[in-house]
Amino acid sequence: MPKAPRSPEEIEAVKADMLGHTLDLIVEHGLEGFSMRKLAARLNIAAKTIYNYFTNKDEMYLTIVARGFDMLFQKCREAYDDGPDPIGRLHLIARAYMDFGIENANFYNLMFTWHTPKYMDYVGTPMEPVARIELETSLKLYGLILQATREVAGPVVNPDDLDEEAKFYVIYFWSLLHGFIAGYNNTMLDYMHDAPLSLKEKLMETFLKNIRTEIAEWSAAKNEN
């Protein structure tokens, strides 16, 4: 009797399991060192079985990164929704971002730290549509943080000026958080402080105090002109 086809839920579960092992192998061997053959050996299946679910290793890599960005977006979206006011929203987003980067180090490193292919590397290739999904997911996260940053400034006379200033602060925001996460994940901060995680809240409080003051001063100056 022929085997019954898998349900959509079963297919997604198989794919999720494959992607989980793929991420582990990429962490162990790097993206260049990862292969379908290594994944098949790890799962104790024939390599051709994997091709029933994924076209190639690039699709697997891009799907993992897209899932990572979606996970991070969902956490930041929940933080945004829970914020009592603009600065409170930014505070909760910063905390959610930092917690994700530390608690999901493998995802985070693949998304932000390691030198791996990005969307432009896939333009004009068969993987461009898959890469676009990853790009759009990451831009959704960027848009949320940009919106939260704009709201800290409040209403301004020239929205275009606000947009440029907000982009600057998002880059500042990301650079600070990323530096701490990367330093913690690669253990560099362990050589600089006995308990680096104990600095997390102070780091965010200092950042938010500075960004609130700077944006408020900028907004006031622009509205006076």
Image (cartoon, rainbow, N blue to C red):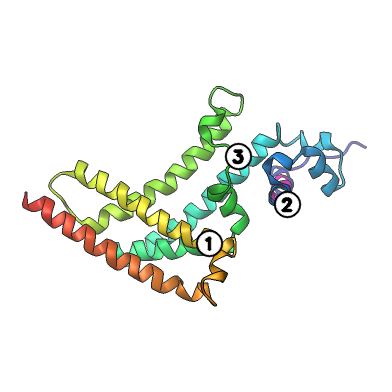
- Residue 70, image x and y in percent? 52, 49
* Residue designated by label 2: 28
Which residue corresponds to mark 1?
Answer: 183
Q: Give the CA separation, mark 2 to mark 1.
A: 19 Å
Task: Say whether residue 224 is magenta.
Answer: no
> Does residue 85 show up?
no
- Horizontal side of 72 relative to 211 (left or right) equals right
* Badge 1 amino acid: Gly
- Residue segment shown in magenta: 15-21
Tell me if label 3 and label 1 are in contact, CB under 8 Å: no
- Which-is-in-front pick, marks 3 and 2? 2
Q: Where does residue 73 sit, x and y in percent of width and height?
A: 47, 52
Residue 66 in the image, given as x and y percentages of width and height: 56, 44
**Image quadrant in which you'd find residue 37:** top right
**Residues packed near mark 3 inside 10 Å, few (<14), some (14 to 19) or many (20 plus):** many
Picture layout, residue 210 above or below residue 199: above
Give the farthest residue toward the right: 1
| Residue that mark 3 sits on | 62
Mark 2: which amino acid?
Glu
Residue at (83%, 40%) from the top-left corner? 4
> Which residue shows up at 21% across the image and 41% down it?
160
